[in-house]
């Protein structure tokens, strides 16, 4: 009877030790879960960046082909005016 109880206790401690080792070692379950979460976050960042690149490419294509876009950029960014237009400056009163 003592021998059977002793074996059960040894098996129990071996089982608990194995579980603790699998969960808490350097390449254990906790590290695996943490790395899996990081991979998900990185994949989300990659998808967002790819979407942003597609939007930039679409904007580049529209600027290359649309005269309206070219004129808008020239007026806003470079403060250009048309040949039959006059520039007016408005001063703010304080």
Image: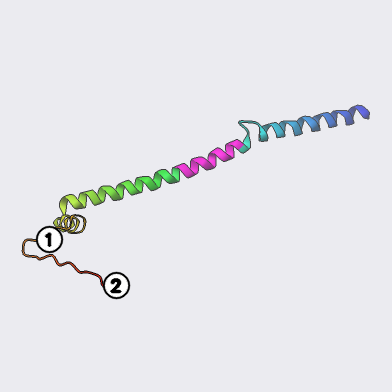
Q: Which colour scheme is used?
A: rainbow
Q: Position of residue 87 (x, y in %)?
A: 13, 65
Up the image or down, 85 lies above or below 42; here it is below
Name, please, the residue furthest toward the left. Answer: 84
Look at the image and say whether residue 6 sits in the magenta stretch.
no
Residue at far front of view = 94
Q: Is residue 47 above or below residue 80?
A: above
Membership of 33 in magenta stretch: yes
* Front residue of this view, candidates 2 and 86: 86
Q: Residue at x 18, y 55 (%)?
A: 78
- Residue sitting at 10 percent across and 66 percent down? 86
Q: Is residue 17 above or below residue 39?
A: above
Camera-side mark, 2 or 1: 2
User: Which quadrant would the C terminus be assigned to in this image?
Assistant: bottom left
Q: Which residue is drawn at 63% across and 33% down?
A: 28
**Around disc 2, counting alpha carbons within 10 Å, would you say few (fewer than 14), some (14 to 19), or many (20 or more)?**
few
Q: How crowded is mark 1: few (under 14 residues within 10 Å), some or many (20 or more)?
A: few
Q: Are discs 2 and 1 less than 8 Å apart at CB?
A: no
Q: Quadrant of the N terminus?
A: top right
Question: Mark 2 = which residue?
Answer: 94
Q: How far apart are marks 2 and 1 (CA)?
A: 28 Å
* Residue 79 position within the rendered picture, expressed as x and y whole percent measured from the top left: 17, 58
Locate residue 60, reporting x and y percent. 23, 49
Q: In which quarter of the image is residue 20?
A: top right
N-terminal label among 2 and 1: 1
SS for callout 1: loop
Dominant secondary-structure state across the stretch colored magenta = helix
Residue 13, x across and y down, in percent? 80, 31
Q: Give the range drawn in magenta.
A: 31-42
Residue where numbered disc 1 is placed: 81
Q: Which of 2 and 69 is in front in this view?
A: 69
């Amino acid at each position: 009877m003592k021998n059977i109880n002793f074996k059960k206790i040894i098996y129990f401690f071996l089982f608990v030790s194995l579980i603790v080792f699998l969960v808490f070692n350097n390449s254990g379950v906790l590290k695996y879960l943490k790395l899996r979460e990081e991979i998900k976050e990185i994949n989300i960042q990659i998808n967002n960046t790819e979407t942003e690149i597609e939007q930039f490419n679409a904007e580049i294509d529209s600027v290359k082909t649309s005269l309206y876009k070219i004129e808008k950029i020239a007026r806003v960014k470079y403060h250009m005016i048309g040949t039959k237009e006059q520039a007016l400056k408005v001063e703010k009163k304080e």
